[in-house]
């Protein structure tokens, strides 16, 4: 899209959206949000980036094929489930460690890792489709 | 050293499979000597089985079982009795010569794969005759069909070979399904998977069904009328395959099945008469068809049909003498027929042709082949003192007992044997006697590996003929006992009763055979003319059925998968209407509808916004505008969610709406569509009607859901446990990533797969578009590489 204003604003917008998507992802367990919605926001950010700067720039920014992110996400989610085997509990049982960091309670858990996997799957898939559709010339 | 039964079974059934996997590797190591190496596998099996012969002929029955699937009550159980041992020894013994022969026959070819297939077949066939468990029996049965498919189609570049392979697989695989059904039925009746424990099944209600299923399996495998057509076509396979699978062993699988089932199903008229009728018909059909052929291999294939029919006929007669004759004939036939096939392969190898009218006077250049043929043909002709003679004497004696059906069978037997005898004479005299005819290749003798089999089998046939009592004690009587289910003593002895009816019938057979041989050319031309006049064969019938099914499938597919998007959508939404309203209407569950509408002004505003969006979609002139209006409607709904207390849902709805608008707009700009919608009026009315009905149906359904009692068990559970055990306040998210994590894992896999599919679609559409514009030069790279190779 050949608009100077859009091209100037887009990187800023994209950066804010990406940070926001991570925020939404991480707060999901206790407030509205989560991996799915976070992934959608991130994918929208990438779609905007692609429109503003061109598909090739968006692909370069991603480093790897967007579907690779999706595959990584499925693998991560599955890994979060498999981790339970180390503790001799059923597949996908939630495992938690909660510790104090500077008087703030921080919780690391397998459901969180699982949710990050969901985030990557949604982001990767939607981004792949959006970029392929935006791409006028080359192969997807 | 005597092998224990378990080791013997492992050597006989499992070792060939292992060797099959290793055969290509062996070929890489020893090259053309592979045949000699892998032939050791059946030799080891033969030796192991031979060690058990004493115990079996003493009346013992040995069972071996390993746990297989204990939770299903399945054991991999094997049973060695006279019947299975006779078959297993034949398979191993002939198999050794076949492997040896194949190595020489395919000299210089890549034979690793071929020998591997043969070995795998051997293991499957041994499993088939030794298995006691019905599931294992079915498994090995189908494995032999698969191996046969691979071997017939070995020369897969020829269309005829591919067709024959598919035909054989379809026919025998179809019979295999019948066998599976029979196995399940027997399990349902007897409560166990072991056939040996099934007992007598003749009095059960399902007996006629069982007979039908078992005979269907046996007749397809053993190529009985009307399933005989696949066997002559299977001669597309390399000659050692024809010798081994399609005369001596695999096609005998059906005969084996009938014999094995005789104690459980035999003795009733429906069993005996069906077997005799189909067996007799196949005997005469094959024997007559053999006269019509000029290709040596085809002649042998047709006589194999006849011999299979003869065996089925004898098992159908079912008396002690008849069954003894069947076992004797099985052994004799396996020896002489495999020998003949191998000699034909040697002739083909040595002269370059298999046409009987083009061969003559080969006794000098191919003396050893000639000797092998003499012994095999004599057995086929039934000359004393060969084993074939005793088999013939025995079957005549069995049926010359005066009942109507056995007399009819006797006539068929004499006629069939005479025809077979004539073919045997032709096979010996035409190619070897008379003047030496010019052949495509200068006639030369085959290598020793190719002659070892015919000579050894011929000598064995003669040897056994001299010691019929020994053969009777070791194999025939134990096998007969196993088939009849009662102990049988052998009565075979080395003598001929010159006054008995059997001998006179043999004499008549010989005279008839010689007469037929002298009139062979006339008979052939008459039969050929008859075949052309009829113009139809079972083979053509198979094609008709086969392509009929393909055409039917095509027609059904075209009917349902017509490729018209608007019709797909119409059908989907129309069915949605039916599915949503139909049950509610029929079961009297239509909702009463909202009694009062108590909405605040801003809620009314949001509803109004949504309605405005929908109306705009319908009225919009351009597609892009319609997409944007759809987004407005979606955002209004998202706001409604927010107002009614579902922030999560609303959040997601916002994002989904935005992305939908973006992606829809992108898709629409890609498709070369009219900017506006120009449907004719009737389409417009149809689509609009379905759309309205669909909306109405979903509304009614949702109302009905709301009006029904709300089951709070799940929400109570999730609300109560979300924080204490899952450490999360957002119940929706906790359900997604923890309580129902497995569902989510499945869903994200689907999301990713759908993404891959979408990319493929987008790419495919793009490629076809590009192909329309500029056709791509096919594989320029390969051309360049070939040019470089030529230059080098």
Image (cartoon, coloured by chain):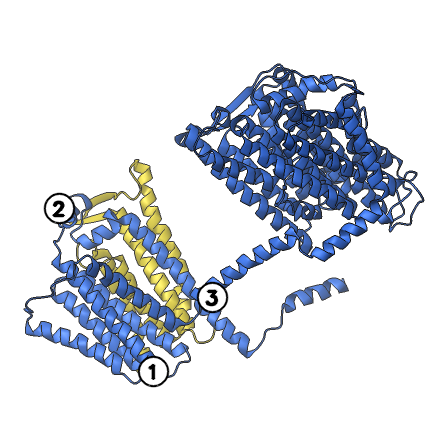
Instruction: Tell me where residue B753 appears, x and y as whole percent.
Output: 39, 58
* Residue at the right extreme of this rendering: B435
Specify the label residue B677 is tagged with. 1
Q: Which callout, 1 or 2, points at the residue further toward the start of the chain?
A: 1
- B640 relative position to B52: left or right: left
> In percent of the image, x 40 and y 81: which residue is there?
B673
The chain letter for the residue carrying disc 3 is B
> In percent of the image, x 30 and y 35: which residue is there?
A88
Instruction: Tell me where residue B292 appears, x and y as whole percent.
Output: 77, 48
The secondary element bearing badge 3 is classed as: helix
Rendered yellow, the chain in question is A
The secondary element bearing badge 2 is classed as: helix
Q: Which callout, 1 or 3, points at the residue further toward the start of the chain?
A: 3
Image position of B732 with respect to B218: above or below: below
Identify the image quadrant of residue B705: bottom left
Mark closer to the observer (1, 2): 1
Marks 2 and 3 in Cβ contact (< 8 Å) = no
- B425 relative position to B718: left or right: right
- A67 relative position to A32: left or right: right
Label 3: which residue? B558
Instruction: Tell me where residue B316 appears, x and y as whole percent.
Output: 61, 31
> In percent of the image, x 38 and y 79: which residue is there?
B669
Label 2: which residue? B720
The chain letter for the residue carrying disc 1 is B
Rendered blue, the chain in question is B
The chain letter for the residue carrying disc 2 is B
Q: Check disc 1: other Cα within 10 Å, few if <14, some if 14-19, many if 20+.
A: few
Mark closer to the observer (2, 3): 3
Marks 1 and 2 in Cβ contact (< 8 Å) = no
> What number of labels is visible?
3
Q: Check disc 3: other Cα within 10 Å, few if <14, some if 14-19, many if 20+.
A: few
């Amino acid at each position: 899209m050949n608009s100077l204003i859009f091209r100037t604003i887009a990187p800023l917008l994209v950066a804010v959206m990406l940070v926001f998507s991570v925020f939404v992802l991480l707060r999901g367990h206790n407030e509205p949000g989560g991996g799915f919605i976070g992934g959608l926001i991130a994918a929208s950010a990438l779609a905007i980036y692609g429109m503003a700067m061109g598909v090739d720039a968006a692909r370069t920014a991603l480093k790897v094929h967007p579907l690779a992110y999706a595959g990584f996400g499925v693998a991560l989610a599955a890994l979060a489930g498999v981790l339970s085997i180390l503790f001799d509990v059923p597949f996908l049982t939630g495992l938690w460690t909660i510790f104090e960091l500077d008087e703030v309670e921080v919780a690391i858990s397998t459901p969180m890792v699982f949710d990050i996997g969901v985030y990557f799957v949604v982001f990767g898939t939607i981004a792949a489709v959006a970029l392929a559709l935006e791409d006028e010339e080359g192969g997807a | 050293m005597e092998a224990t039964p378990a080791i013997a079974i492992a050597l006989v059934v499992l070792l060939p499979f292992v060797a099959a996997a290793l055969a290509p590797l062996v070929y890489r190591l020893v090259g053309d000597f592979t045949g000699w190496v892998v032939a050791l596998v059946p030799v080891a099996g033969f030796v192991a089985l031979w060690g058990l012969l004493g115990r079996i002929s003493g009346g013992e029955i040995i069972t071996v079982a390993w746990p297989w699937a204990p939770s299903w009550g399945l054991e991999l159980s094997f049973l060695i009795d006279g019947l299975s041992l006779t078959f297993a020894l034949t398979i191993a013994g002939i198999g050794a010569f076949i492997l040896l022969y194949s190595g020489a026959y395919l000299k210089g070819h890549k034979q690793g794969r071929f020998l591997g297939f043969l070995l795998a077949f051997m293991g499957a066939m041994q499993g088939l005759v030794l298995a006691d468990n019905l599931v294992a029996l079915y498994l090995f049965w189908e494995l032999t069909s698969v191996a046969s498919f691979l071997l017939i189609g070995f020369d897969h570049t020829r269309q005829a070979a591919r067709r024959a392979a598919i035909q054989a697989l379809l026919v025998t695989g179809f019979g295999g399904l019948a066998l599976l059904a029979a196995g399940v039925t027997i399990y349902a009746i007897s409560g166990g998977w072991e056939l040996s424990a099934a007992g007598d099944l003749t009095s059960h209600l399902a007996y006629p069904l069982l007979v039908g299923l078992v005979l269907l399996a046996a007749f397809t495998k053993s190529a009985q009328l009307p399933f005989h057509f696949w066997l002559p076509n299977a001669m597309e396979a390399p000659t050692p395959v024809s010798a081994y699978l399609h005369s001596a062993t695999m096609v005998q699988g059906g005969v084996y099945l009938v014999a094995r089932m005789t104690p459980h199903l035999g003795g009733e008229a429906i069993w005996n008469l069906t077997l005799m009728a189909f067996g007799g018909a196949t005997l005469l059909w094959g024997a007559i068809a053999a006269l019509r052929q000029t290709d040596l291999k085809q002649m042998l294939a047709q006589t194999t049909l006849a011999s299979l029919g003869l065996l089925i006929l004898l098992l159908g007669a079912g008396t002690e003498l008849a069954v003894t004759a069947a076992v004797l004939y099985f052994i004799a036939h396996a020896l002489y027929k495999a020998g003949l096939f191998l000699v034909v392969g040697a002739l083909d190898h040595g002269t370059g042709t298999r046409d009987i009218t083009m061969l003559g006077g080969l006794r000098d250049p191919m003396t050893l082949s000639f000797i092998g043929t003499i012994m095999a043909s004599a057995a086929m002709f039934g000359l004393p003192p060969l084993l074939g003679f005793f088999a013939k004497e025995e079957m005549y004696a069995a049926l010359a007992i005066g009942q109507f059906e056995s007399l009819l069978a006797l006539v068929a037997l004499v006629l069939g044997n005479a025809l077979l005898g004539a073919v045997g004479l032709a096979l010996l005299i035409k190619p070897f006697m008379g003047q030496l005819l010019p052949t495509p290749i200068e006639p030369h003798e085959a290598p020793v590996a190719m002659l070892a089999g015919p000579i050894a089998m011929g000598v064995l046939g003669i040897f056994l003929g001299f010691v019929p009592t020994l053969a009777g004690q070791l194999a025939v009587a134990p096998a007969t006992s196993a088939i009849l289910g009662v102990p049988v003593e052998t009565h075979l002895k080395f003598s001929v009763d010159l006054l008995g009816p059997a001998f006179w019938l043999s004499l008549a057979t010989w005279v008839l055979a010689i007469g037929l041989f002298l009139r062979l050319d006339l008979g052939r031309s008459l039969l050929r003319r008859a075949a052309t006049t009829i113009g139809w064969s079972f083979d053509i019938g198979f094609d008709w059925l086969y392509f009929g099914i393909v055409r039917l499938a095509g027609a059904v597919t075209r009917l349902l998968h017509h490729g018209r998007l608007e019709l797909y959508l119409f059908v989907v939404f129309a069915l949605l209407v039916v599915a949503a309203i139909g049950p509610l209407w029929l079961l009297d569950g239509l909702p009463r509808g909202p009694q009062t509408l108590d909405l605040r002004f801003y809620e009314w505003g949001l509803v109004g916004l949504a309605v405005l969006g929908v109306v705009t979609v319908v009225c919009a002139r351009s597609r892009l505008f319609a997409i944007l209006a759809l987004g407005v409607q979606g955002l209004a709904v998202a706001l409604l969610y927010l107002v009614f207390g579902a922030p999560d849902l609303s959040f997601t709805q916002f994002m989904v709406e935005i992305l939908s608008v973006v992606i829809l707009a992108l898709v629409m700009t890609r498709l070369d569509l009219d900017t506006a919608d120009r449907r004719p009026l009737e389409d417009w009315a149809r689509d609009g009607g379905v759309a309205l009905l669909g909306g109405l149906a979903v509304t009614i359904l949702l109302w009905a859901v709301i009006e029904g009692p709300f089951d709070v068990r799940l929400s109570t559970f999730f609300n109560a446990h979300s924080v204490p055990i899952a450490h999360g306040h957002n119940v929706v998210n906790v359900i997604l990533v923890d309580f129902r994590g497995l569902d989510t894992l499945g869903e994200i896999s689907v999301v990713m797969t759908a993404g891959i599919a979408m990319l493929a679609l987008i790419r495919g559409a793009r490629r076809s578009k590009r192909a329309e514009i500029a056709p791509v030069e096919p594989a320029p790279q390969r051309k360049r590489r070939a040019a470089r190779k030529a230059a080098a």
